Amino acid sequence: MILEQLGRLLLTSESIYSDLQSINRSFPTITTSTLAGYMVNLGHHLMMAGSYATKCAGDNVTKTSTKDEALYVMLTEALPGFLISDFLKCQRLPSLPSIALRILRLTQSSKATINDVADTIEHDPALTARLISLANSVHHTRSANSTQTCLEAIQRLGLDATLTVVLSFNLFQHPSKGPQHTHIWQRSILSALIARQLAEQACPKQAGNAFTAALLQDIGILALSATYPEQVDELYIDSAIPHARLIEEEQRYFGCDHTVIGAWLAAKWGIPSAMVNTIRFSHAGYTSDSLMETCVRISGPTADACLSRAPEEQLATLLYDLSTTSGMPSFSFKSVLQEVQPKMELIAKTLMIDTPVAIDPKELLENAQQLLLNHTLVLNSRREAQSKALNMLRKGYSAPNGLNKQIAFKKLNK
């Protein structure tokens, strides 16, 4: 415990950073940022040593493997030193209690039952009461019998909605400051539902993992929002901007993007390393060695398209990118969107957040495919025109008394 407190002190003490400036004046060849980096790394190593000592002493803390600790250190070193310092000083940095972490692990286990999930949730009376209350809301009541137990509440809500409620209960405790915060939560839920449906087609046994990873892929934004509220409000003021562009802006503002921050936060919580890595690369290219990760990577852009002001254009772009990506599984987006739409509405009402604008999946796909067809026709027309022009040039150059003499004559007259 003492080591952990010392490490936290190294990371949060403002006097240490003022001392670094004095050292820099005495030794100009050593930059303040370099010294700060050494101090941040030392602080984290001390914190982890203290945490490990506490675990060995028998505290009731979720155990992490050596590999998890190594991943945490690697992600810590990937973040700028000032971010780590500010995150650890932030009193509102998102946290995940041990119960929520155990529920996450249970939902990823093929051996876990709904009874196991209920037994775990019942250790948190406030969360249990919240689930029962939601299950008895008008959106879920289909009979005169009210829900009395946690198990009945989970059966009525479903595992996906239950997990979403558990995470929202812990990660979205603070009131929203604006529509961009609602958009972040909408995107997370919509991405999770899309990832599950994609995984049901490509890798059914990993559908639950895909849902969880997609739900958590933007938690880095929550950390940034809690630590730098004014900057984040400015950065995310236009909720229609796709995340591919947001990442570029985050790099400019903070020196890294929310996927790395989210992975660091997940590793800090003790989430399994496979899930941490899925969050880290959730916004990377569509192809992956893991079909589950592919589903997660596609889920975000699909959600962006559904939430955008011009969904047909964004979805057409996504369909084109997927069609030109080698090794990409064939997905039925029509069935995905048809399954997701009613579930999204129900979860949004359950969590009392704004429901995204309703879309007609069939019409959206037809319009997107028509745009894609038009785009393909235009491309083919341009290619055909370029091919004809190239053939004419080749014939002109090969003609004995044609283009070659004209070119030679022009050169002589220059």
Image: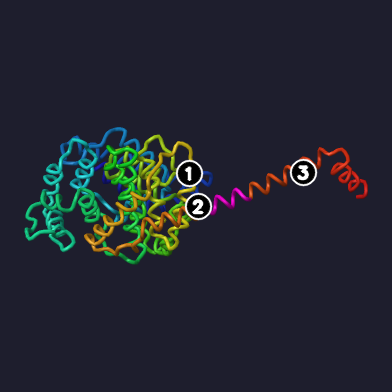
**What number is the disc on residue 323?**
1
For image coordinates 45% across by 61% down, the residue present is 310
- Amino acid beneath label 1: Ser
- Amino acid beneath label 3: Leu
- For the residue labelled by badge 1, is the local secondary structure a helix, a strand or a loop? helix
Is residue 380 inside the magenta stretch? yes
- For the residue labelled by badge 3, is the local secondary structure a helix, a strand or a loop? helix
The residue carrying pointer 2 sits among few (fewer than 14), some (14 to 19) or many (20 or more) residues within 10 Å by Cα, namely: many
- Amino acid beneath label 2: Leu
Residue 313 % position (x, y): 47, 57
For image coordinates 76% across by 44% down, the residue present is 392
Q: Which residue is mark 3?
A: 393
Range shown magenta = 373-381
For image coordinates 32% across by 58% down, the residue present is 186
Mark nearer the N terminus (2 vs 1): 1
Left or right position of 160 against 324: left
Tell me, yes or no, if residue 6 can be seen here: no
Mark nearer the N terminus (3 vs 2): 2
Residue at the extreme right of the image, as rendered: 413
Tell me, yes or no, whether the two marked residues, 3 and 1, touch with CB atoms within 8 Å: no
Residue 276 % position (x, y): 33, 41
Q: Quadrant of residue 279?
A: top left
User: Which corner quadrant holds the N terminus?
Assistant: top left
Q: Which residue is mark 2?
A: 372
Tell me, yes or no, if residue 380 can be seen here: yes
Tell me, yes or no, whether the two marked residues, 2 and 1, touch with CB atoms within 8 Å: yes
Left or right position of 7 against 414: left
